Amino acid sequence: MPVFKDEDSREVFQNGKEGSVSSERLAFTGRIAAGIAHEIRNPLGNVSMAVQQLKKAFAKESPWAKHIEIIIRNTERINFLITELLNSARPSKLNIQPYDINVILENILYSLKTKLTSQQIEVHKQYCPGFPVIHVDKEQISRAFSNIMLNALESMPDGGSLTIFTETEGDFFTVKIHDTGEGILEEDIIKIFDPFFSTKSSGVGLGLSICYGIVVSHGGIIGVESETNKGTIFTISLPIR
Ligand SMILES: Nc1ncnc2c1ncn2[C@@H]1O[C@H](COP(=O)(O)OP(=O)(O)O)[C@@H](O)[C@H]1O
Ligand SMILES: [Mg+2]
């Protein structure tokens, strides 16, 4: 069982290439994406309104009606994606309360129980002792951790182990989530927090960009280390107050 001290995490990946990236390097891409999304929103709104007028002007039987429906469907899809993207870059106002973070993690694991069992994933917990209370928005932090855990599960379709490690370090509380899944290619690691980056056939690619927004809006740091065919460790450090 690996011990996740910084110096030890290198040991976990000692055979082969290791990739890592952390949030300080990533803020820029998210801000650009949010900027573009914001600019697209207004013209898109105009397209939506105009096409609604066209819909009124043409009878249902008109040969143009189906084209109008296509425009409506696609503008709605773009609007959904843009909204998700903006939410990921700027999570809604935080409702900060004191919570025992180990309990938050336990609740997420409980909600994933069926998946964990059916995929034959062993769970190991190395929680720091006591009741580590930190000040967070419970809904949002839960969303961030569950996105990371879902990715971990998706990286281990044929079973493996998921280890959750927590510790208090000075003014920060750190959670490490380690899976023994497929890992992330070295060339991909810099892209995984980008909105819409996904290597999955049906992935939307917003899970980690949402996580990133949530962690950073809490004044925290998110980082990842990974090695292909060995596994991945996500590290989230949150200020205790
Ligand atoms: N634990 C993990 N193991 C392997 N790859 C991962 C892991 N977590 C994230 N990734 C990579 O990061 C990409 C982006 O993740 P995410 O933003 O959650 O989008 P999605 O899950 O929809 O693909 C994934 O498609 C995958 O390539
Ligand atoms: Mg995901």
Image: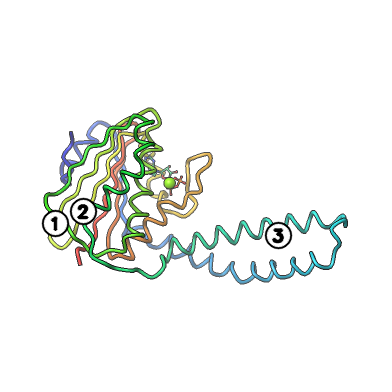
**Residue 174, label in figure:** 2
Q: Which residue is mark 3?
A: 72
| Residue 205 located left or right of residue 25 | right
Q: Residues within 10 Å of mark 3 (few under 14, many from 20)?
A: some
Tell me whether circle 1 and circle 2 mark residues in contact (CB < 8 Å): yes
Q: Residues within 10 Å of mark 1 (few under 14, many from 20)?
A: few
- Expressed as whole percent of the image width and height from the top left, the position of residue 104 reads 27, 53
Q: Position of residue 207 (x, y in %)?
A: 43, 51
Q: Amino acid at mark 3?
A: Ile
Upstream in the sequence, badge 3 or badge 2?
3
Quarter of the view holding residue 52: bottom right
Element on which disc 2 rests:
strand
Residue type for callout 1: Glu
Q: Secondary structure at mark 1?
A: strand
Q: Residue at x 75, y 56 (%)?
A: 69
Q: Could you tell me which quadrant the N terminus lies in? A: top left
Q: Earlier in the sequence, mark 1 or mark 2?
A: 1
Question: Dot 1 corresponds to which residue?
Answer: 169
Q: Residue at x 86, y 61 (%)?
A: 59
Q: State how far apart marks 1 and 2 are (Cα).
A: 7 Å
Which quarter of the frame holds ligand 1? top left
Q: Nearer the viewer, residue 20 or 179?
A: 179
213 to 179, vertically: above or below: below
Label 3 or label 1, whichever lies nearer to me, is 3
- Frontmost residue, 185 versus 220: 220
User: For numbered disc 3, what is the local secondary structure?
Assistant: helix
